[in-house]
Amino acid sequence: MSPDCGRRGIEWRWELAPGQFTVHIDVQQMEQVLVNIIKNSLEAIDENGAITIQTSTAPSRMLRIIDTGRESLRSNGSSCLHRFSAPSATARESGSP
C-alpha cells in the first residue's frame, strides 16, 4: 500500500499514545479488518490526502483510522463506525464488506 501512497501524494500520520498496552484479539482477524479499512480509505482519498492512525488509552483503549477522503463514499456523510461490528457493514455500493 505504501508505494501507491507515495505516487498519489498520500501522507501517513501516526499519533500514538505513549507507552504500550495489551489487547486480547485475534491477530489475523484484526489484520484483515485494518487492511480493509485502509483500502477503503485509499479508495476515498483523492491525490494529496492523508491517513492518520491514532491510539489512545484514556478513558479506554482506542484505535482510530482517519482519512481525508470524500464523504460521498461514506453512506452520504454519516459515520459507519456504529455499524462496525455488523458482518456486512459497508458504505460502498460495490465490493466486499
Image (cartoon, helix red, strand yellow):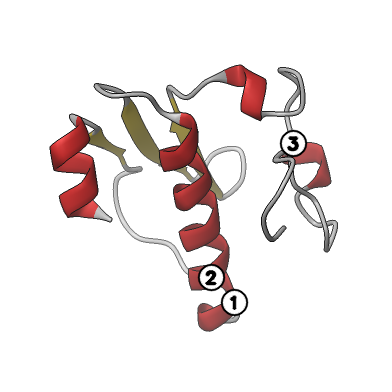
Which residue in the protein does label 2 denote? 32
Is residue 76 rendered to the left or right of residue 38?
right
Q: Which quarter of the image is occupied by the N terminus? A: bottom left
Residue 66 in the image, given as x and y percentages of width and height: 47, 32
Is residue 48 rendered to the left or right of residue 62?
left
> Amino acid under label 3?
Cys
Q: In the rendered structure, are the residues bearing label 3 and label 1 in contact, judged by CB atoms less than 8 Å apart? A: no
Mark 3 nearby-residue class (10 Å; few <14, some 14–19, many ≥20): few
Q: In the rendered structure, are the residues bearing label 2 and label 1 in contact, judged by CB atoms less than 8 Å apart? A: yes
Residue 74 in the image, given as x and y percentages of width and height: 68, 29
Residue at 47% x, 24% y: name it.
69
In whole angstroms, how far apart are the C-alphas of marks 3 and 2?
Answer: 17 Å
Which residue in the protein does label 1 denote? 29
- Of 64 and 79, the residue lying toward us: 79
Residue 29 in the image, given as x and y percentages of width and height: 59, 76
Mark 2 nearby-residue class (10 Å; few <14, some 14–19, many ≥20): few
Which residue in the protein does label 3 denote? 80
Where is residue 16, by image quadrant? top left
- Of 49 and 14, the residue lying toward us: 49
Is residue 78 rendered to the left or right of residue 74?
right
Give the vertical position of 28 relative to 58 (above or below): below
- Of 82 and 88, the residue lying toward us: 88
Q: Secondary structure at mark 2?
A: helix
> Amino acid under label 2?
Gln
